[in-house]
Image (spheres, helix red, strand yellow):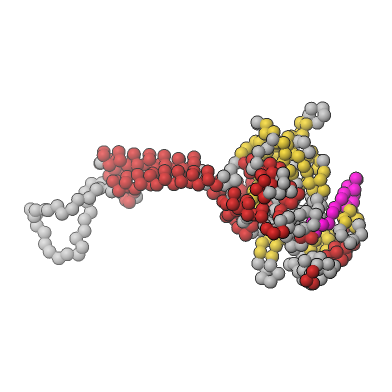
Amino acid sequence: MPATGAIIDEIWIYPVKACQGIQVEHARLTPTGLELDRTWCLVDTEGTNITRNEVISQRRIPILASVTVALSQDKSSLFLQAPDMPILTIPTDLNAYSKEEIVQVESCEKSKTTGEGWSLGFVDGRVHAEGSAWFTQFLNQHVQPGGKLRSGFTKASTYALVRAQGQLDMTSYTPAFPVLEKAVHDESYRNRLSGNARRFADFAPFHLINKASARWVGAETHSGDSYPTRSFRANLIVGGEAEPWVEETWRTIQVVHTSKSGRNTVVTFSKIKDTPRCTVPCRDQQTGNFLFPKDSVLLWKVLRKAFPAKAKDPEWGAWRGPFFGVYFGHGGQEGTIHTGDSIRVVARCNWDDHLRWQLSDRWAVCAAVATESAQLWKAFKEGLPTKAKDPKWSVWRLFFGLYSGHGGQDGTIHIGDPTQLVARCLIWPLLDRWSMCAAVSTAMGIISAFSLVRAHSAQ
């Protein structure tokens, strides 16, 4: 396996979904991703502003980006801070929640008025009472102009801080998007999901981005040396010698850690799907405000203009949007990853493989059509052997004689009556079939050439 020169440059966990993340030097792998990542979330218990018990993302309440999260040295506690609020301390151990209220959190995003939207399933959790009161007070404060609360809504509600006690396996997802519908019937798609689970993450256990790609976006948006990588809220940020957008070509990678003694430990990650972006990457991850107030979705515009096909991937359905980053899975492996770990590429792919008719497949079809054409032409020239192979007769396949009809005419025929040839035909319309195959072969060549040019221009 060739070395890529790429490394794991940064590792981030986001213990409380929608709040700020914590950069760490190393992280333990669990069945649901990095330890403690997206283990807590907020829900609107009354359903006043957001569908009741729907996991709340920064898409819903951007101000949650202003809530800082820190982890105690022994990982036993989280410390949360927010503007005009005292420090909140919450335990990380699930056993500390054993007597707390149980709630089913829906991994969804639905309209409050119509109920329409998407849902992937439910995760069981337990409420942290003190944390719930803390967030309720914070989000219901009158601080925004126009009568809006800090939450961005005009009505107060009751919010709960929920700690996950279960997980949502990706193979049990509701087929809310076409990519998940394919997994029901297509084994290759099902294998992408198999063994992977998450808690309150949007879709997959790991999200990976590339610093080189962020620098490319930074140049296009004139936002400095790099677009702020924190705005993408990724777990794994790739650095080193990685080229822009190379991460989209990684079907399978190995993250290799070399100890001081020279011993290598390897964790394998497999690509699940390129990540369509919502408005969260357009926001500052300390205030929740848009990075470019005069052009709030500038990131979208840049990516759509540069890569229009990536913003229209039909496999994402309602989530269709410009790509940045890649969702990866680890199949539930255990282990630890560290900053500085090297990346080996085991298998590559194209982001749009599912949209292409693979060249090998096209050539195979063209070859089959050409072979059939040659066989039909040979049969036409030899003539008689084809009489014994007419598929229209099924088991009656040996020809001798001719069935003819008279259309119900009246009259009398006699021995010795002369015959007159009015029209001829082929025994088996081989010429028609040969012409059809030739036409199909020509069309296939044109389609192949057009598809290759289109695929190249979409890169």
The stretch in magenta equals 64-78
Q: What x and y, as percent, mark residue 403?
A: 23, 54
- For the residue pair 399 and 123, the one nearer the viewer reads as 123
235 falls in the magenta region: no
Tell me which residue sits at (30%, 38%) in the image: 378
Q: Quadrant of the N terminus?
A: top right
| Residue 74 among those drawn in magenta | yes
Q: Position of residue 347 (x, y in %)?
A: 62, 37
Q: Please indicate whether residue 317 sits to the left or right of residue 43 in the image.
A: left
> Looking at the picture, how far across and down is residue 337, in whole percent?
78, 39
Question: Residue at coordinates 64% horizontally, 54% vertically from top-left?
Answer: 300
What's the residue at 67%, 50% (across, down)? 221
Residue 193 visible in rendering = no
Question: Could you say which is closer to the camera, residue 314 or residue 266?
Answer: 314
Residue at image x 79%, y 27%? Answer: 262
Q: Is residue 422 visible?
A: yes
Q: What count of labels does the image hold?
A: 0
Image quadrant occupied by the C terminus: top right
Q: Position of residue 333 (x, y in %)?
A: 74, 42
In the rendered view, would you say 255 is above or below 304? above
Q: Residue furthest top?
A: 261
